[in-house]
Image (tube, grey):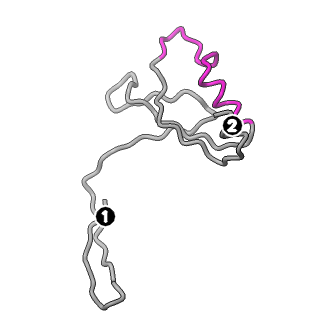
Amino acid sequence: MTEAVKDGVDTLNLSVEPYEPGEDTITFLDVFEIFTLLARRAGVFVVQAAGNKGSDPSSVVSFSPWSVGVVACSTYRSYPATLFLGNGQSWVIRQV
């Protein structure tokens, strides 16, 4: 992370989910969290995967207020669209 900040990146996208801390654990002293905080203080937008280890079903772990927690989900919605090609053909596609 330090090298990325030195290189002048605008965004760090981290696919590393936070561990599930115990109730009495101070998460700020975690080395990973300190480095994400330092990146944020340097003006880098920090995005981190939110782990699927929340206390309730369908809940997540994301405890760093300086990084944005993101999750993946599935949906059964579809969005039909038509793709028009330069040769006059068209294709109906479904976007998810």
CA gap, disc 1 and disc 2: 34 Å
Task: Give the residue displayed 59% in from the left and 13% down from the top.
Answer: 26
Q: Are marks 1 and 2 in contact (CB under 8 Å)?
A: no
Q: Which mark is residue 40?
A: 2
Q: Is 74 left or right of 16, judged from the image as shown?
A: left
The secondary structure making up most of the magenta span is helix
Give above or below for 92 relative to 43: below
Pick the residue in front: 21 or 30: 30
Q: Quadrant of residue 57?
A: top left
Q: Position of residue 20 (x, y in %)?
A: 45, 19
Quadrant in which the C terminus appears: bottom left
Pick the residue in front: 3 or 94: 3
Q: Is residue 45 magenta?
A: no
Q: Which mark is residue 27?
A: none
Name which residue type carries label 2.
Arg
Residue count near mark 2 (Cα–Cα under 10 Å), binned few <14, some 14–19, many ≥20: some
Magenta span of residues? 21-41
Q: Which mark is residue 95?
A: 1
Q: Quadrant of residue 55?
A: top left
Q: Position of residue 91 (x, y in %)?
A: 26, 79
Q: Is 39 left or right of 50, judged from the image as shown?
A: right
Task: Give the residue displayed 32% in from the left and 78% down from the top.
Answer: 83
Q: Residue lying farthest top?
A: 24
Q: Position of residue 12 (x, y in %)?
A: 59, 42
Name which residue type carries label 1.
Gln
Tell me the element at label 1: strand
Task: Give the residue displayed 66% in from the left and 40% down from the top.
Answer: 4
Tell me the element at label 2: helix
